[in-house]
Structure formats: structure tokens, C-alpha cells
Image: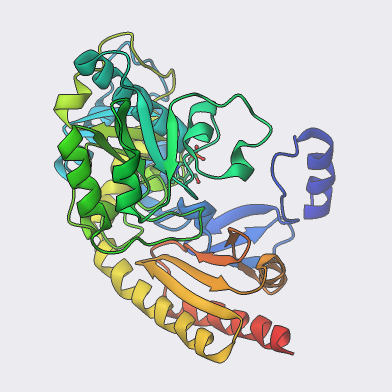
Amino acid sequence: MNSQQWIEKADRYIMTTYGRYPIVPVRGEGCRVWDADGKEYLDFLAGVAVNNLGHCHPRVVAALQQQAAKLIHCSNYYHIPSQIELAELLCSHSFADKAFFCNSGAEANEAAIKLARKYSRDTYGPERYEIITATESFHGRTMATVSATGQEKVQKFFDPLLHGFRHVPFDDAAALAAAVGPQTCAVMLEPIQGEGGVNVPSPDYFREVRRICDEHDLLLIFDEVQVGMGRTGKLFAYEHFGVTPDIMTLAKALAGGAPIGTMLAREKYAAAFTPGTHGSTFGGNPLVTAAAVTTVRVMLEEGILNRTEEIGEYLLGELERLKEKYPFVMEVRGIGLMIGMVLTIPGADIVKQGHARGVLLNVTHDTVLRFVPPLVVTKHEIDRMIAILDGIFAEIKG
Ligand SMILES: Cc1ncc(COP(=O)(O)O)c(C=O)c1O
């Protein structure tokens, strides 16, 4: 079937939760994807920061194929070797002692919310349950994570929200300190806000947040669903900020495109989860964790992190050049390959123009073009994308 035929069938059978573009990708390799009509695109969205190793990395494909032929799923009633290996890999490369596995970012954050509440209830009693999060944050689409999210557009229509979340401005430690009360149990933040417009906090913000959390024995939860797994040039984004959290959530890029989520925690807090307090049928099953073990190994063994830092600087520099040229580009910001270009005009048409010219672009927060390509993107591919963007911008200019 061609793209148009697929789209007509989708209109008939798929719920309209997404404003989808008329593109039907059917194959991918590295930084490129092809649609059902054979048209090629350069992918600067990477499945929204998922395909960090590029599409169909051969080692991840082989891991999935081999595991699929051995055991796809059993149950968390039993021990799962690839899940255990993944937990060891993640813990030995982070602050964490223990891992819980689930299937998505929202579920990982649900687990973090439940663990923070359970620890605080066990330690201080039932009155201490509130979690402070940031305005413009994004933590997922389940009811608890919608309630945690600091964006009205995500929350509206779904009242009553879950009780027990308070929102304060991001990058404002004084506002956070003022919001802490006897009911507070945790603080949950993205190290860099993704959906909120690629918002990078000032260098001292997280040190101050950590100090506030320590002073009141609040759990510090970092949502690294979007910025973790090498996206910023470090395996985890918190490594840039000179602090460690108590809990960290990961998902998106962790299994090279297979659906997974995880919540990592220090032992002191992890111990609050006892048998029967939380779970997931598919969470950390043999197939996805085999893919994830290989994804993490590739990231550590193939020099991806250093490369991301270097190529990220190159992309940032090229985008800066466009900023000098076009007055409607206000700011370019980001770390590694998590880059936002803030415009004075809406970005939606630019994205559509990009599609027409063979590049998958993205806009978040209406006016921020977000660049989150596979970490294996080459300078040549960046040059091609920049030339296309330059052409689109030139037409806007008049
Ligand atoms: C920071 C952050 N947290 C949580 C989520 C939700 O993840 P998922 O869509 O896998 O549930 C996202 C998704 O974009 C995210 O960017």
C-alpha cells in the first residue's frame, strides 16, 4: 500500500489522539528513514529522542532477533537474566543501587511517585505525600503524571487531578524552598525540560535544589526520560550539574526503540517497595531488556558519549549561524544533542516545509524547534539539514 492508502485506513481505525503528519515511515537505517512511497528523510527527531543509536543499529537488531528466538516473555514471578544484567549495568554507571522495570516514561514516573510516597509514609506517616514539580514540566499522560506535569494544556479536560502535587517555576530555587512544607515528601524535576521548550537551568540551580532536599529529607527525583541515555553527551544528564538524585527515571532511548521504562533508586528508598506494592506484567521482560543491555553496551563501548558532545557543539554552532542571519531566531540553547531554537514566530509551518524537503523536524512549545537527532548523526547530515533549514528560513524572510 502507498502512504495515502495507509492514511485513509488510519483515519478509519485509529483514534485521533495525535495530530499526525501525512508521513508513513516503513524503514530506517542510522539517521535516515523511508516512507511507504520510498521517499527518504533525514531524521532530526529520532522518534522523539528514542533512536539514540540510529534506526536499526545492527547490534540491537541482533540482540532482539537472538532473544526473540529464545524467550520473549515469562513473568516477573521469576528471575530474568537480561533484566538482572541491565540493572547491574545501570546501577554500576550511576548513583543508584536498585532498579524497577516497566514499559514507558509515564510508568517509570508513576513508580517514582509511588516509591516516594511509600518511603515518606513509612518514615514520617501519612500526612507527608506532596511532590513539588515545575511549571512547564512534562512527566507523562497517565493520571498521576498528568497531575505532576506543569502544563495546563496537558491537564485540561481531566479533572479532578490527583491530589498532592504543587508546581513552582523551573530554575527558581527560592520558589522551591518557599513551597516546602510539612506535607512535602519529594521534588521531581527534569534536568533539562524537553517538552517545555528545551529549558536549561542555570549552573547552580540543582546544587541549591539538592541542598533544600537534604535539609528536609525530601527525595530528589530526576526525570531523565528524555535527556538520559547519552542525549547530552553524558550517560545521564545529572552528571552535568554536580549533584546526584535519589531516584531517576529513564525510558525512551534505553532499549534502542523497544518499549521500556525504569526507575532507579538508592537502597535507602528502594527498600520501601516490598512484594506486592508495585508491579508490571511486561516490565523488564526478556526481549526488551536484551535490547537494552546491548543498547547501553554500544553506548559505552563505541565512543558515542564523547562523539555526542563534539557533534552537538557542531550542530549548536551551525544553528547559531542561522540565528545571526535571521531576526526571527531569538535563541539557540541546549547541551549535547538536546538543542532548542527559539523563534519569534510559530514553528509548525517550518516543520511541514522540512517534511516536504526531506527532513523530519519538530516543534515544541509552539515556537521552539527541537533538534534531537540520533547520536550517530554525521557532520555531513547536519550540513544537509542546515542547508534545508536555511532555504526554508530564507523564504520566510521574504
Ligand atoms: C521528560 C519526560 N517524562 C516522561 C515522558 C513520558 O514518557 P512516555 O511517553 O514514554 O510515557 C516524556 C515523554 O515525552 C518526557 O519527555
The image quadrant of residue 360 is bottom right
Give x and y (percent) for residue 15: 75, 34
Q: Nearer the viewer, residue 62 or 297?
A: 297
Give x and y (percent) for residue 109: 40, 33
**Residue located 53% across and 60% down the image:** 45
The image quadrant of residue 374 is bottom left
Q: Nearer the viewer, residue 111 or 260?
A: 111
What colouring does the structure picture have?
rainbow
The correct choice, above or below, for 394 with respect to 303 in the image is below
Along the horizontal axis of the image, is 347 left or right of 123? right
The correct choice, above or below, for 128 with respect to 64 in the image is above
- The residue lying furthest to the top in this view is 276
Q: Nearer the viewer, residue 95 or 177?
A: 177
In this figure, what is the number of numbered marks?
0
The correct choice, above or below, for 388 with respect to 116 in the image is below
> Can you say which quadrant of the picture contains the C terminus?
bottom right
**Residue located 72% across and 71% down the image:** 356
Along the horizontal axis of the image, is 388 left or right of 169? right
**Residue located 44% across and 22% down the image:** 282
Let me know if residue 354 appears in the view: yes
Give x and y (percent) for residue 211: 17, 46
Let me know if residue 288 appears in the view: no
Give x and y (percent) for residue 176: 33, 45
